[in-house]
Structure formats: C-alpha cells, structure tokens
Image (spheres, helix red, strand yellow):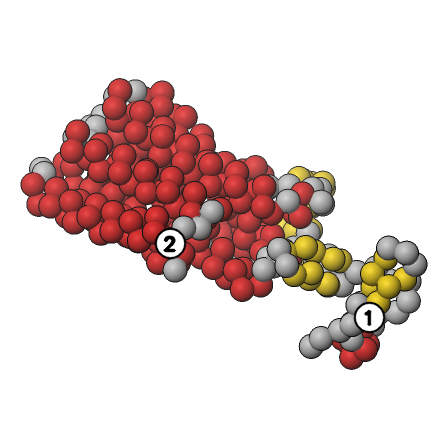
Amino acid sequence: MKRKINRVGPSTLTVSLPSKWAKTLGLKAGDEIEVEERANQLVLSRERTIEKKDITIHYPSKQRFLKRFLVSAYIKGYDTIQVTYDDPVLFGLVQETMNKLLLGFEVVEHSKDRCVLKNIAEGMEYEFDNTQRKYFLHIKQLLSHLIEAIQNKDPQELEHLLFVDQTVDKLCQFIRRMLNIHGYKDDSKGKSLYFIDNLLESIADHCRDIAKHMQRTGIYPSSDFLVLLKQVAQNIETYYQLFYTFNREKLVDLKERDVQIKKSVLEQIEKHEHQHFLFYHHLLGMTEICHDLSEEMG
C-alpha cells in the first residue's frame, strides 16, 4: 500500500491513515497511536489496553506441584493471584515461591486460610530489552563462577553461582510473563525469543547441577573438563555478541566450534572414570543447547 506525503505548514509532513485500518481499531480524531522508528520503517500501532486478570487457586492440603501452579499463573499474566488453603503451613510455601520466582509480586493480604499476591511493579514490564540483556549477562556470570570454582577448587564460588542462579530463574519467568502479556515489538521474533530464553535457562540449570554435585561429593572435575567448559563459555559469549550484532561468518565459525566441542566431550566420556560421568553428562547437555542456540540464529 502506498500513501502520498502531504505538507502542513512550512515544515510538517503528514500521511493519512488507511480508512479500513482506522475503523477496525476504532480510531478517531484526537486519539493517540504509537509510532516506532525501525531503520527505514515507521511502525504505527494502537496502544493496547492490557486487561488485568485475577485468578483463585485452592489447595486443600500440601501439594508438590504448588510452585508449578503459581508460576504458571504468573507467566500467563495474572495480576492478582488469590490462594486459598486448608493448611496454614501452605502460606510459607507460597511466600517462598513468590520471593524466588515471581518478580514484581508481593503479598497484599494474608489470613489463616487465604493469601493474595499482587503485581506491584507496573511499568517494569515494558523494560523488555534491558531485562533480556541482564538475563544474558547473568548466564555468562554463572559460567564464570563455575569456571572459577573448578579452577581454584573454591566452595565460595559455588555459593555465588547458586545465588546468581536464583536471579536467573526469576528473570526467566519474568521474561516469559512479558512475552505472554505484551508480545515482542517484532512479532516474527517473539516465539524465537521464548525458545532462546528457555535454552539459556537450561544452560543455567546445568551449571547449578554441576555446582550442587561438587558441593555434595567434594569432587571437582578434571583439567580436561575445565578446558571444554571454557570453550562452551566462549561460545555463549559469541552467541551473546551475535544476538545483538549479527555476523554470518561468525555464526558459521560458531557452528563449527559447537560440533568440535561436542565431539571432544563424547571422547572424554569414554576415557574418564564413573565419578566424573555426571560432569560430562551436563557438559554434553550444554553443547547440545549451544548447537540449538546457533541453529535458532539461522
């Protein structure tokens, strides 16, 4: 569709809106619309009014899936989550889940048989790009802590890693919530971002499980493992750079490195003793995720 540019006054240029589009959205003179600049494009959209949603969840007794149901309601975009229960002990579990995973929510009401969680961070949900970058940086930080912990056999680094992992979990759920409520400014990338962030969370989960295994057993991986882990961390760094500044040559190189690292990990699995198998299992998982990330880039 082409439209003519009109001049209004000495320096103002205007373009008329397509009548059918304006009628479909119920636009009239005096209404405001969003105008977004994208290189040589202007994207016009009507500011969406997000309907606030409430949900009530009842738990008759202590259940193992409590956290999952709460997180699901949060991700789906509910602004108020009322939880009713027969056992007052459940309030502690609700509060723990909220503190660990429901960024922006607080308990606003509480009694012996119910509590109400409410979103008190309106406006923060529009800061998607900043949150996404922060999420990436925390994933890189996790890998850095893991490398330092193995290199120096430092239990304190493992504690730092587990602390950062909690923030990663919280940011991941928040990003999912934002994508479900608002979508992404480029619709063609919304589903891809959801997939990418899930993959990054899986990287974090592997780091967490390696750290917990070291804490539990006192066993640290070999120097061969450390070399391969550093290569994985370098590939994640490259992926981070490509995410913001795409370069096809670098992507091809990244894909080739992914293949080589996976081959090396499989070779090491055959060589090492049983006590190191779990480390390489998680490292193999990370190499497969790196492959999926590079494939998602193109």
Q: CA distance from mark 1 to mark 2?
A: 39 Å
Q: Amino acid at mark 1?
A: Ser
* Residue 167, percent from left and from top: 50, 36
What's the mark number on residue 248?
Answer: 2
Left or right of 236: which side holds 244?
right
Numbered marks: total: 2
Left or right of 279: which side holds 74?
right
Q: Amino acid at mark 2?
A: Arg
Q: At 16% across and 41% down in the image, what residue appears?
A: 277
Please state, as top left, top right, bottom left or bottom right, where the C terminus lies in the image. bottom left
Residue 211 appearing in the image? yes
What's the mark number on residue 16?
Answer: 1
Q: At 43% across and 43% down in the image, what residue appears?
A: 241
Residue 276 found in image quarter? top left
First in residue order: circle 1 vs circle 2: 1
Neighbour tally class for label 1: few under 14, some 14-19, many 20 plus, Cα within 10 Å? few
Disc 2, SS: helix
Left or right of 67: which side holds 206?
left
* Residue 137, percent from left and from top: 47, 36
Disc 1, SS: loop
Please state, as top left, top right, bottom left or bottom right, where the N terminus lies in the image. bottom right
